């Protein structure tokens, strides 16, 4: 009977391996670009197609992150507003815009406000739906040159510590975007390993990164604006977000940008699909009758 016992063990082991090696559920945050606001028509799961790596993958779920008319029940959002503590002092005129934006958020958006300092993010409280409390964390920046060290050090450090909880994880960075550790703001030298690392870290964590450009207390001028905006655009496009800026100078108000960002939240969905494999893989999404954008790369195995 010993041979029978070994045979049964072999069958059970093979079954367990088959179960482990079966389709793995993978997800990404995506945005419908040609729809706006909470009244946007709902896209049915049958209209959505995903290509992951080199293969078409079966879509298993399609859910809005925020509830509302035409959306159904949302999955919820954790929104981190990360402010570069090295922004110049004129940033003070934007405080009211940011506070009003936070206070107007619906209950399914939990907010934390953090200041980027010395390569990390310092927060006064965790994510909260007490929006008045979160708004009180908005303050003047230190306005010291290089106070953040690098916004990309801070972004990498923050997203690595963000624990998955089923909600959409979204960052809004307010920064000049300049990477002082690149050593140059020349248009001929726009390659930074620290920016590349921040992009990969956000992609692995499934975080969509948005940004608003504002001048820092150091490295000012047209070249600095070009360099910072170029990096912020790269990070946003790689993670499925958007970089907002107005020419090479500071905007007179953040309100128009925050309105567009708010619309983007309502147009964001989590798509789940059969993944598998290891590491970051190329990702492409499309939907019948709508333009949909998302991250360029998605982590194959859930964190």
Image: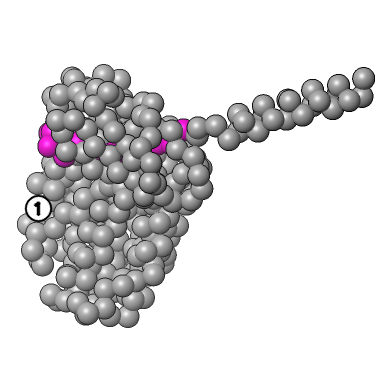
Along the line of sight, which residue is nearer the eye, 169 or 187?
A: 187
Q: In this view, does 117 lie above or below 163?
A: below
Along the line of sight, which residue is nearer the eye, 280 or 121?
A: 280
Residue 198 within the magenta-colored segment of the rendering: no
Q: Is the magenta stretch mostly helix, strand or loop?
A: strand
Quadrant of the drawing holding the N terminus: top right
- For the question of whether residue 248 can be seen, the reply is yes
Q: Where is residue 113 in the image (x, y as percent from the top left)?
A: 33, 47
The colour scheme used here is one colour
Residue drawn 33% across and 76% down? 182
Crowdedness of circle 1 by 10 Å Cα count: few (<14), some, many (20+)?
some
Residue 28 within the magenta-colored segment of the rendering: yes
Q: Position of residue 163 (x, y in %)?
A: 48, 42
Residue drawn 17% across and 70% down? 225
* Residue 76 in the figure: left or right of residue 9: left
Which region of the structure is painted magenta?
A: 25-37
In the rendered image, which residue does mark 1 sit on? Answer: 253
Residue at disc 1, secondary structure? loop
Along the line of sight, which residue is nearer the eye, 87 or 273?
A: 273
- For the question of whether residue 102 can be seen, the reply is no
Q: Position of residue 105 (x, y in %)?
A: 23, 33
Q: How many labels does the image show?
A: 1
Query: Residue 87: which quarter of the image?
Result: bottom left
* Residue 270 in the figure: left or right of residue 225: right
Query: Residue 224: which quarter of the image?
Result: bottom left
Q: Where is residue 26 in the image (x, y as percent from the top left)?
A: 44, 36
* Residue 144 in the figure: left or right of residue 263: right
């Amino acid at each position: 009977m010993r041979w029978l016992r070994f045979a049964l063990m072999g069958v059970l082991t093979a079954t367990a391996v088959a179960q482990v090696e079966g389709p793995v559920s993978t997800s990404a945050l995506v945005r419908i670009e040609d729809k706006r606001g909470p009244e946007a028509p709902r896209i049915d799961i049958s209209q959505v197609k995903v290509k992951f790596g080199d293969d078409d993958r079966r879509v298993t779920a399609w859910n809005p992150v925020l509830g509302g008319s035409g959306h159904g029940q949302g999955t919820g959002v954790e929104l981190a507003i990360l402010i570069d503590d090295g922004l110049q002092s004129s940033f003070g005129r934007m405080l009211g815009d940011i506070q009003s934006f936070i206070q107007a958020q619906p209950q399914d958006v939990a907010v934390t406000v953090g200041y980027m300092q010395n390569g990390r993010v310092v927060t006064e409280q965790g994510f909260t739906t007490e929006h008045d409390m979160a708004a009180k964390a908005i303050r003047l920046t230190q306005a010291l040159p290089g106070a953040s060290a690098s916004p990309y050090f801070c972004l990498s450090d923050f997203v690595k510590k963000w624990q998955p909880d089923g909600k959409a994880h979204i960052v809004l960075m307010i920064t000049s975007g300049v990477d002082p550790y690149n050593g140059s703001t020349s248009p001929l030298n726009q390659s930074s390993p620290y920016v590349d690392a921040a992009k990969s870290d956000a992609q692995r964590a499934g975080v969509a990164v948005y940004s608003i450009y504002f001048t820092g207390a150091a490295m000012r001028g047209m070249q600095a604006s070009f360099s910072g905006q170029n990096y912020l655009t790269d990070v946003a496009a790689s993670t499925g977000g958007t970089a907002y800026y107005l020419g090479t100078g500071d905007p007179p108000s953040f309100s128009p940008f925050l309105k567009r960002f708010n619309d983007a939240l309502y147009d964001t969905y989590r798509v789940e699909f059969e993944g598998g494999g290891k590491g970051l893989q190329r990702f492409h999404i499309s939907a019948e009758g709508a333009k949909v954008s998302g991250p360029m790369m998605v982590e194959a195995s859930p964190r």
